[in-house]
Image (cartoon, grey):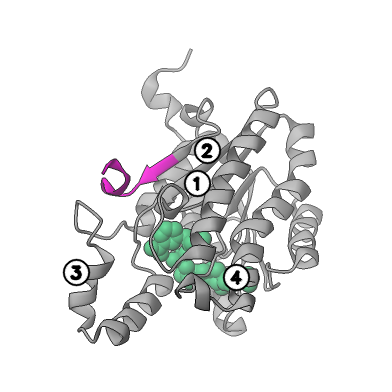
């Protein structure tokens, strides 16, 4: 029988394989690095500068002594999500930990919301998680162990104006989380949704710039009076807080945490 401190150790995930979508930046990168530092091989994914992403892949391998692959597919496309999971499975023999993190944001009143932005956000922020889970789950079931962590948002639990597609996708991913958790409850596989409030990443930096223009405010004013207005603790969540939560959920202590949102929101949704 292990004691409480032992249950929180991540030794047990050493040598496992983690796929983290959207892991070349922000939250996904912090999660991928934390899993690599715990000894997991990692399948990175992300768009952007190919040379910078390759340098990141090589650095993670060097710093953590694990194998790291890089996929530059557009995960808003079903076939590219399937290819990402299939390629990683071929290299590593299976995916043990799947973190569905890739996501984008677009802000507009619902009656002006561009159709293509709606379609992109639903495809990337919601459907890509379904396709990745569907492709990774059979191997997890065979091995009798798996951790699926969906990076949702406080916007999976509450809404804000002008974010119809994002709020819809994030509420949807919580429904997907609950369903997968129930279907896998006896298979040693958990499925959870992390719900952070604002995290200062490139995704939010873009929102700060846009809101400053819309409200004719300085970026500092936007952070204080708009972005963090609903967040009682008045500070951004750190990417490493989310990464540490993923490690906790993957440790033996996380074995019974399934089908639930795990909030890191400084009290936002307590209101
Ligand atoms: P980010 O912009 O820093 O990183 C996004 C990652 O997704 C990058 O690696 C990017 O290359 C990748 N990506 C974007 N479009 C892609 C596509 N079509 N195909 C494949 N990869 C793609 O964003 P972030 O702030 O780290 O957000 C990560 C996740 O966390 C998102 O799902 C977001 O909704 C969620 N989240 C963010 C915040 C926040 O305040 N930043 C809060 C709550 C939840």
| Sequence order check, earlier mark of 2 and 1 | 1
Q: Nearer the viewer, mark 2 or mark 1?
A: 2
Element on which disc 4 rests: helix
Q: CA distance from mark 1 to mark 3?
A: 38 Å
Residue at 72 percent of width and 29 percent of height: 144
Q: Is residue 249 located in the magenta-colored stretch of the structure?
A: no
State if disc 1 and disc 2 touch (CB < 8 Å).
yes
Classify 189 as above or below 244: above
| Sequence order check, earlier mark of 3 and 4 | 4
Classify 9 as above or below 20: above
Picture coordinates of residue 81 (x, y %)? 73, 62
Residue at the disc numbered 3 = 225
Residue 250's disc is 2
Q: CA distance from mark 3 to mark 4?
A: 27 Å
Q: CA distance from mark 3 to mark 2?
A: 36 Å
Classify 246 as above or below 117: above
The crowding category of the residue bearing disc 1, from other C-alpha atoms within 10 Å (few below 14, some 14 to 19, many at least 20), is many
State left or right for residue 173 relative to residue 231: right
Residue at the disc numbered 4 = 118
State if disc 2 and disc 3 touch (CB < 8 Å).
no
Along the line of sight, the residue nearer the viewer: 155 or 253: 155
State left or right for residue 15 relative to residue 227: right
Along the line of sight, the residue nearer the viewer: 227 or 215: 215
Along the line of sight, the residue nearer the viewer: 201 or 12: 201
What range is drawn magenta here?
A: 262-271
Classify 202 as above or below 130: below
Q: Nearer the viewer, mark 1 or mark 3?
A: 3
Q: Nearer the viewer, mark 3 or mark 2?
A: 3
Q: Nearer the viewer, mark 2 or mark 4?
A: 4
Q: Nearer the viewer, mark 1 or mark 4?
A: 4
The crowding category of the residue bearing disc 2, from other C-alpha atoms within 10 Å (few below 14, some 14 to 19, many at least 20), is many
């Amino acid at each position: 029988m292990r004691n409480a401190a032992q249950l929180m150790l991540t030794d047990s995930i050493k040598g496992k394989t983690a796929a983290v979508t959207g892991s070349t930046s922000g939250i996904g990168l912090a999660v991928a690095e934390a899993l690599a530092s715990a000894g997991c091989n990692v399948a990175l994914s992300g768009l952007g500068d190919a040379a910078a992403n390759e340098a990141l892949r090589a650095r993670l391998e060097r710093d953590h002594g694990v194998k790291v692959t890089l996929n530059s597919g557009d995960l808003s496309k079903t076939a590219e999500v399937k290819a990402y999971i299939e390629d990683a499975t071929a290299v590593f023999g299976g995916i043990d930990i799947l973190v569905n993190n890739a996501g984008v944001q677009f802000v507009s009143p619902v009656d002006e919301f561009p159709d293509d932005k709606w379609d992109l956000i639903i495809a990337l922020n919601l459907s890509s998680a379904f396709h990745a889970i569907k492709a990774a789950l059979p191997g997890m079931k065979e091995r009798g162990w798996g951790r699926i962590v969906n990076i949702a948002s406080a916007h999976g639990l509450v809404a804000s104006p002008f974010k119809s597609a994002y709020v819809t996708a994030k509420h949807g991913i919580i429904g997907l989380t609950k369903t997968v958790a129930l279907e896998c409850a006896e298979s040693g596989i958990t499925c959870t949704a992390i719900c952070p409030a604002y995290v200062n990443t490139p995704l939010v930096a873009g929102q700060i710039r846009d809101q400053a223009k819309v409200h004719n405010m300085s970026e500092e004013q936007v952070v204080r009076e708009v972005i963090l207005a609903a967040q009682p603790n008045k500070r951004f969540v750190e990417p490493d807080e989310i990464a540490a939560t993923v490690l906790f959920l993957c440790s033996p202590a996380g074995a019974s945490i399934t089908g639930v949102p795990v909030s890191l929101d400084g009290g936002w949704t307590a209101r």
